[in-house]
Image (tube, rainbow, N blue to C red):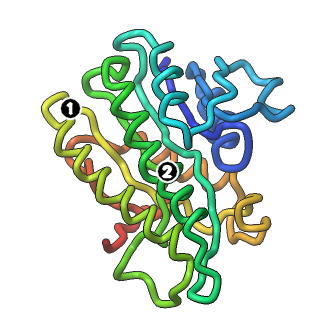
Amino acid sequence: MQHIVITGGNKGIGLALVKQYLAKGDKVSVICRQPSAELADLDVTLYSGVELGEPQKIKDVAAKFAENSIDVLINNAGIFCNETLDNFNETTILKQFQVNSIAPVLLSQQLLAALKDGGKIAMISSRMGSIADNDSGSYYGYRMAKAALNASSVSLAHDLAPRQISVGIYHPGYVQTEMVGFGGDISPDEAARRLTGLISELSPANSGKFYHSNGSELPW
């Protein structure tokens, strides 16, 4: 049995990940702002009231985990806004940087003592953070924040290599969640199935790589 910690596990992809790890017999802890009714019915350890845009909240919740107690940390929580040149909103751009790029790295850093040597960190990123893959423009804050997350995740992979902690960077696919108005191509359950498979294959040999949930490697 592994101990899996998932941020944003109250809905969407996060909730689907929670269910799939529970079905495998793993212990699951969820960090989120507020639990959903569906999450509240599951056998998880819940840390609610955590606003990932507030660094002190991250530090406070991280302090609740014992040393060497976590096998896998999945930084799944995120927010999505669409800024264009005609609607360039500095406030939403900065918020996306705080939640989508700084928070996952800060939480990972704060949980280093709790992560076991040989453990894993999964960053749920997006192909919208790929510079080479950008063929449509707009989405300034989301693209910049996910590109920053990708860059910092590679640094994390290098810095944690001496402890054999592997870092995976994953695009879940275009998933039918509230974030995209439920207009995706695959269900949260399918995305979670793919992601759990990739995380199980994560190792020092492929740490710091950027993958689509279908298994293909994505360009930076």
Q: Is residue 173 left or right of residue 133?
A: right
67 on left or right of 48 = left
| 4, above or below 220, in the image | above
- The crowd level at tag 1 (other Cα within 10 Å; few <14, some 14-19, many 20+) is some
Q: Residue at x 56, y 87 (%)?
A: 85
Looking at the rendered image, the disc whose residue lies closer to the viewer, 1 or 2, is 2
Which amino acid does the dot numbered 1 rest on? Gln
Q: How many marks?
A: 2
Q: Which of the 4 image quarters holds residue 34?
A: top right
Q: Residue furthest front?
A: 90
Q: Quadrant of the C terminus?
A: bottom left
- Nearest the viewer among 8 and 195 is 8
Q: Residue furthest right?
A: 37
User: Which label is found at residue 98?
Assistant: 2
**Mark 1 = which residue?**
164
Quarter occupied by residue 20: top right
Image location (x, y in percent) of residue 95: 56, 56
The image position of residue 216, as x and y in percent, is 39, 67
Of 79 and 172, the residue lying toward us: 79
Question: What is the CA distance from the residue labelled 1 to the residue labelled 2?
Answer: 28 Å
Image spot of residue 163 (x, y percent): 18, 28
Residue drawn at the location 67% of the way across and 21% of the way down: 46
Neighbours of disc 2 within 10 Å: few (<14), some (14-19), many (20+): many
At x 60%, y 72%, the residue is 89
206 shown above or below 160 = below
Q: Is residue 15 above or below residue 65?
A: below
**Residue 56 at x, y percent in the picture:** 50, 28
- The kind of residue tagged 2 is Gln
Sequence-wise, the earlier of marks 1 and 2 is 2
